[in-house]
Image (cartoon, rainbow, N blue to C red):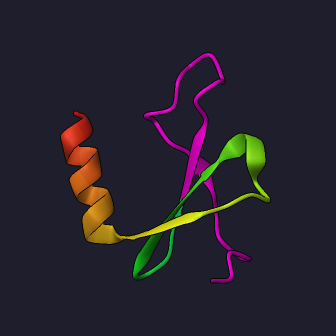
Amino acid sequence: MNNSGLVWFKSSYSGAEGGDCVEVAADPGVVHIRDSKAVAGPVIHVSRDAWAGFVRRRR
C-alpha cells in the first residue's frame, strides 16, 4: 500500500515523554498506524471501524 501523500499526526494516546510515539493517518477507507521513531518502517493498516473500536476501548 502506498503511504505517500498521507498526513500523519501524533496520536493523543502517545506518551508525553516521547517514548511511546504512535502516529496515525487516515484516508477514506483505512487508518494507517506507525511508530514515529521509525517512519520508514512498517505501517499497520486497519479499517476505520476497527480503529474506532480500538479508541473506544482505550478510554
- Rendered position, 3 above or below 53: below
Place residue 40 in its image quadrant: bottom right
Which is more toward the observer, 25 or 33? Answer: 33
Q: How far from the left and from the top, in percent, is residue 41?
A: 74, 57
- Image position, residue 45 (x, y; %): 49, 69
Q: Residue furthest right?
A: 40
On whether residue 49 falls in the magenta region, the answer is no
Left or right side of 32 for 52: left
Give yes or no for residue 11 being in the magenta stretch.
yes
The quadrant of the picture occupied by the C terminus is top left
Residue 5 occupies which quadrant of the picture?
bottom right
* Labels in figure, total: 0
Q: Is residue 42 left or right of residue 56?
A: right
Q: Position of residue 39 (x, y in %)?
A: 75, 54
At 56% from the left and 19% from the top, the residue drawn is 16
Chief secondary structure of the magenta portion: loop
- Read off the magenta span: 1-24
